Amino acid sequence: MIDKNIIQEAVAHAKAENPKESCGLVVEADGQQQYMPCRNVSADPNNNFQIHQEDWCRAEDDGEIIAIVHSHPGESSRPSQADKFQAEIHGLPWMIIGHNGHEIYQPNGYAVPLLGRDFHHGILDCYQAVRDWYSRECNILLRDYERNDCWWEAKEAKSLYTEQFALEGFAEVSLDEIQRGDALLMRVGRTHHINHAAIYLGDDPSFKSEDAPKLFGQGPFFYHHLYGRNSTREVLGDSWLRRTEKVLRHKSFL
């Protein structure tokens, strides 16, 4: 239970930071709670938040972190898919402050559906969709990696997808050998690096892990989560094949 005065401090902080998203931590020490305002170091603070690592460490030094707080400026306090997803990762209550007051979301085992998920780069994006598909459909666990928005635009940046997939046990195969479950690495737009990952589904677009609606039309199909859109399945037609630069297969299927 979060004290009423802590909630009032968090609401005041949210108003002071508007139109940016505020963020903070509730810390408990010796039976006393305190609200610690934190710096939002997100590249897009009006729509996202990222707590400064120094602020998180300072909170841990002061006591036990018992809740994470952030605001939804001009929006409802209802938790988004990304909020629920991150609350499950941290295993902590997630207090959200909106124009209609506040809401405290308790982790309860929520799993974001594979289809129709919202896009939040670095949280719910194409790589997370690939991770979740392999985990739920094949029981293959891929590690997460930090990825800043638009890293693919920097010529000097590492090519995250090509390097990280190799670290996760993937090897390149020919497009002629493609089979269900292969990862597709694509270049969407004119970028310095491959910037999109997907899963090849073949002629069967169904998922074992959830009751996905049937698709009409002739495949082959693929599953992906494109920047700024909801995750979906599509036909792997000529336009997507032209964007596909590598086909990778996990060592479990080699």
Image (cartoon, rainbow, N blue to C red):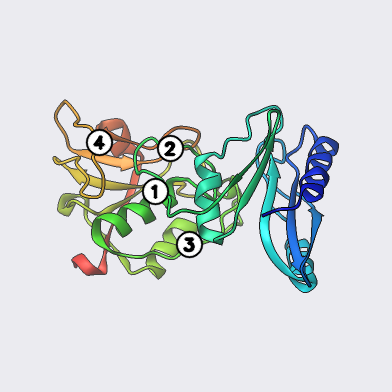
Image quarter of residue 249: bottom left
The image's mark for residue 144 is 3
Q: In this view, does 250 lie to the left or right of 38?
A: left
Give the spatial CA distance, label 1 vs label 2.
10 Å
In this orientation, does residue 196 appear? yes
Counting from the top left corner in percent of width and height, residue 213 is at 23, 32
Circle 2 residue: 226
Q: Residues within 10 Å of mark 2 (few under 14, many from 20)?
A: some
Image quarter of residue 93: bottom right
Q: Which of marks 1 and 4 is nearer the N terminus?
A: 1
Q: Earlier in the sequence, mark 1 or mark 2?
A: 1
Q: Earlier in the sequence, mark 4 or mark 2?
A: 2
Give the spatial CA distance, label 1 vs label 4.
17 Å
Q: Residues within 10 Å of mark 1 (few under 14, many from 20)?
A: many
Which residue type does callout 4 highlight? Leu
Q: Earlier in the sequence, mark 2 or mark 3?
A: 3
Q: Is residue 203 above or below residue 5?
A: above
Counting from the top left corner in percent of width and height, residue 72 is at 67, 35
Counting from the top left corner in percent of width and height, residue 6 is at 79, 50
The image's mark for residue 228 is none
Circle 1 residue: 129
Give the spatial CA distance, label 4 vs label 2.
14 Å
Which residue type does callout 2 highlight? Leu
Which residue is rendered at x = 75% and y = 52% of the image?
3
Give the spatial CA distance, label 2 vs label 3.
18 Å
Do the CB atoms of the residues marked 1 and 2 lie less than 8 Å apart? no
Which residue type does callout 3 highlight? Asp
Q: Is residue 71 above or below residue 56?
A: above
Circle 4 residue: 236
